Amino acid sequence: MTLRFDKLGVVIAAIAAYAALLAPFATFRANRIVPGQARSILEALPSATGPLLLAIVIAGALIALLKTPLLLRLAAGVVALAALAILIGTAGSFLTPAGNTFVRVSPASGFWLLIFAFTLLLADVLTRLDLSPWARVGVLIAAALAIGLLLVSGQWDSLSILKEYANRADGFWAEGAKHITLALGSLAAAVVVGLPLGILCHRVERLRAGVLNVLNIIQTIPSIALFGLLIAPLGWVATHVPGAGALGIRGIGTAPAFVALFLYSLLPVVANTVVGLAGVPRGANDAARGMGMTDRQRLFDVEFPLAFPVILTGIRIVLVQNIGLATIAALIGGGGFGVFVFQGVGQTAMDLVLLGAVPTLALAFAAAIILDAIIEMTSIRRHEASPA
């Protein structure tokens, strides 16, 4: 009998083996800012639980390594990720002395590498299964519910990131609301301005090159530099324009962050609108003209619906981009999860950095999956509606 190896599985098994046997599973610190002490899986977990986790990881790595059925690979990925998620909380409780509120226990490189390896296995299986858009959204919801259940159950309460959250719970949700408002608000403004501008650029060829070149130049400006460049003009507006200050327009704070994100958002929206409208089949337009449709009717009833998947792709790019860039807004007082990231950097408290970074990554990941599903569904409908 000849064993057949999966190419991606070789990589996954190698990462899992290194992470489980050589890399630290958890980090123990006497308080939140002192250097940590590495703990392996066997050192970080109770005597019966450590070998169990090693067995699950090794079994999952072997299943990934060999060409095994997709459902078995799916089960291996789910079981390994569930065991890691549950047992890292057990490690926090096990390593924290009773009654000690200063000790900090956090996941170490081995844990994150194992999460990466088995997430990669799970993603590969889901790709091969070719799930429908609704099924992918369902997987996302199931994962979110599982994480929510772990948070509510208190399984992770002994981990340092949850201790940082407990000290900043009110501020966390307030900054989260600012982060989402910045990302979604700037996207909405870009759509309102960018769609008509893209339609105009599509119709007026001489305007197209100039507008897209200007927007390309804006994209090349580093985010922190653009935030800084906006401080002076917005400060002048706040000082000299009656009522501007009452509307929240200032040299620092939310206003420059919002304007910068809006400017960054314009290029994907405008460019994808132009590309989408240019890709509308000539036959569809000819048929619409033959039916006596006006230019306005052709735009809204024929061209825009057919171009919508491409336009939506630009909106997806903008949303994921803005969720990440909104983190930088904290440097100019714009708020958001970046507040915790930069506070953590200033205090050399990595768990505080993670308190801002992890929800940012989660929001961007969820937004990408949901919008990818919507894009695929609209593309299917466009294909079904197109003439043969």
Image: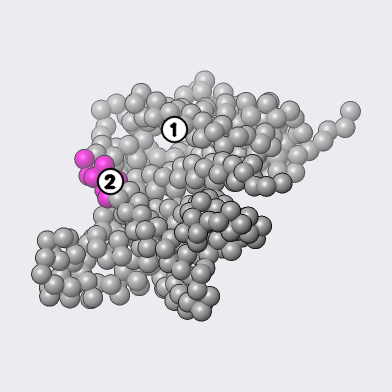
Residue at point 51% right, 31% down?
Answer: 138
- From the top left corner, tell me how far across and down residue 387 is, in percent: 67, 47
Residue 45: image x %, image y %? 47, 28
Label 2 vs label 1: CA separation? 19 Å
Amino acid carrying label 1: it is: Ala
Task: Give the secondary structure at mark 1.
Answer: helix
Q: Identify the amino acid type marked 2.
A: Ala
From what the image shows, is residue 347 above or below residue 174?
Answer: below
Circle 2 sits in a helix, a strand or a loop, which is it?
A: helix
Rendered position, 75 above or below 178 = above
What is the crowding at mark 1: few (fewer than 14 residues within 10 Å), some, or many (at least 20)?
Answer: some
Q: Does 218 appear in magenta? A: no
Is 155 displayed left or right of 250 in the figure? right
In this rendering, would 190 be left or right of 213?
left
Residue 21's x, y, as percent? Answer: 60, 38
Q: Which residues are magenta?
A: 170-179
Which residue is located at x 43 percent, y 60 percent?
A: 195
Mark nearer the N terminus (2 vs 1)? 1
Helix, strand or loop for the magenta stretch, by majority: helix
Mark 2–mark 1 contact, CB under 8 Å?
A: no
Nearer to me, 105 or 177? 177
**In the drawing, what numbered circle is on residue 177?**
2
Identify residue for label 1.
144
Any mark on residue 97, and which?
Answer: none
